[in-house]
Image (cartoon, rainbow, N blue to C red):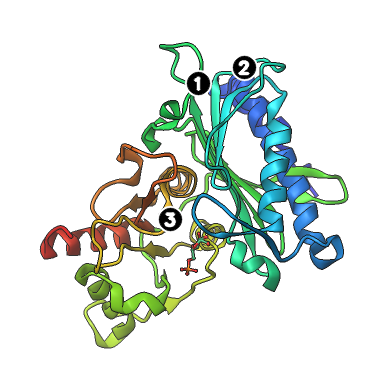
């Protein structure tokens, strides 16, 4: 068997060839990857680790926190605090940003994460994941505040996720395509399994929570109705449906074999943008999907161009195979903006 390339070797070679991974960013990626290994161990223990079930608290989203949500958040905070690569962190599980304490050196990057996405799946042993996004701290002032995080997704310098499934796989972009590393548990290291990931422009597979159908706006309803009509309808081909209710798992399938993922706004309240979080779910996933040749919009505009106004703001998400996302956008334009 040919020698597998480790994450460290990949990052060193990328830096040597493309000069696109400065030392602090390489440290950041390796620290996050190490934290994901620790999260994977806790997740894989399940009931044996007494980490299942609710923590009896709520997060800023008003969602009941699982024990593993809090554990994963603490693992990422502790792993990243001391390295000197960050100025601050933001998390789905924390109301406020976490500024690096004075006892550690300040770095040039901002790290945002959803420490354990898909929590409703934890107790039923279905794939979940960690999502992360990296921004540069603005250099035009001293100190760091929440306002420094409010940058559009097109400013990300890196993004990725780790899916805790049958394999534990780290998926990463630094703006030069998408690569995948799988964890070798015997060696305790990440090894390259896919490079230059490409999403097919067309698909026969859609992902949406069908129980919300009565709340969909006309363009979404039209798109899904045509998928359901299959060969008897306008699309002239049959579609399959998947909904794992774990964005990391659904996006990983789309990066692996194509598809479209939709979490649209509720037509009864068009002013409410949607369920998913912009800064640490939609932006990193949109960066990955676009780097793999796909598209990601909120139904009307490119997700990566959205100017955030709040750290925990939400957004509608339509992402995946380019031709399918563009079809939904076209239906929007015909139906008029929501
Ligand atoms: P629903 C998980 O809670 C999450 O944030 C995403 O990972 C997932 O795609 C979505 O919500 C599932 O939402 O309404 O189908 O449970």
First in sequence, mark 2 or 3: give its number: 2
Is residue 182 in sight in this rendering?
A: no
| Mark 2 Cα-neighbour bin, 10 Å: few <14, some 14–19, many ≥20 | many
Number of marks in the image?
A: 3
Q: Say whether marks 2 and 1 touch (CB < 8 Å).
A: yes
Q: Quadrant of residue 155?
A: top left
Foreground pick, 2 / 281: 281
Circle on res. 144 = 1
Which residue is drawn at the image coordinates 63% and 60% (left, top)? 128
Residue 22 in the image: x percent, y percent?
59, 19
Mark 2 vs mark 1: in front:
1
Extreme residue in the bottom direction: 232
Foreground pick, 152 / 74: 74
Circle on res. 276 = 3
Q: Is mark 1 within 8 Å of ligand 1?
A: no
Note whether 256 is above or below 278 in the view shown.
below
């Amino acid at each position: 068997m040919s020698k597998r390339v480790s994450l460290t070797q990949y990052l060193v070679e990328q830096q040597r060839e493309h000069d696109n991974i400065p030392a602090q960013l390489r440290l950041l990626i390796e620290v996050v990857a190490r934290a994901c290994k620790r999260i994977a161990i806790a997740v894989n223990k399940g009931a044996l680790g007494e980490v299942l079930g609710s923590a009896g608290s709520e997060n800023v989203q008003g969602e009941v926190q699982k024990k593993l949500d809090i554990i994963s958040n603490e693992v990422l905070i502790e792993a990243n605090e001391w390295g000197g690569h960050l100025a601050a962190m933001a998390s789905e599980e924390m109301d406020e940003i976490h500024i690096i304490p004075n006892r550690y050196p300040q770095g040039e990057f901002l790290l945002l994460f959803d420490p354990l996405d898909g929590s409703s799946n934890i107790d039923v042993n279905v794939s979940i994941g960690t999502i992360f996004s990296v921004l540069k701290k603005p250099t035009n002032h001293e100190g760091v505040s929440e306002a420094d995080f409010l940058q559009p997704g097109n400013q990300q310098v890196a993004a990725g996720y780790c899916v805790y499934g049958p394999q534990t796989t780290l998926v990463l972009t630094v703006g030069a395509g998408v690569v995948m590393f799988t964890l070798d548990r015997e060696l305790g290291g990440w090894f390259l399994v896919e490079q230059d990931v490409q999403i097919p422009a067309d698909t026969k597979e859609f992902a949406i929570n069908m129980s919300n159908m009565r709340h969909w706006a006309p363009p979404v309803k039209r798109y899904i109705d045509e998928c359901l009509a299959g060969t008897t309808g306008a699309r002239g081909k049959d579609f399959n449906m998947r909904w794992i209710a774990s964005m990391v798992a659904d996006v990983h399938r789309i990066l692996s074999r194509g598809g479209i993922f939709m979490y649209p706004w509720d037509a009864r309240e068009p002013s409410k943008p949607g369920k998913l979080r912009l800064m640490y779910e939609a932006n990193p996933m949109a960066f990955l999907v676009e780097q793999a040749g796909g598209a990601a919009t909120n139904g009307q505009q490119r997700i990566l161009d959205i100017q955030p106004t709040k750290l925990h703001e939400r957004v509608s998400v339509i992402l995946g195979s380019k031709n399918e996302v563009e079809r939904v956008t076209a239906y929007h334009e015909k139906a008029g903006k929501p």
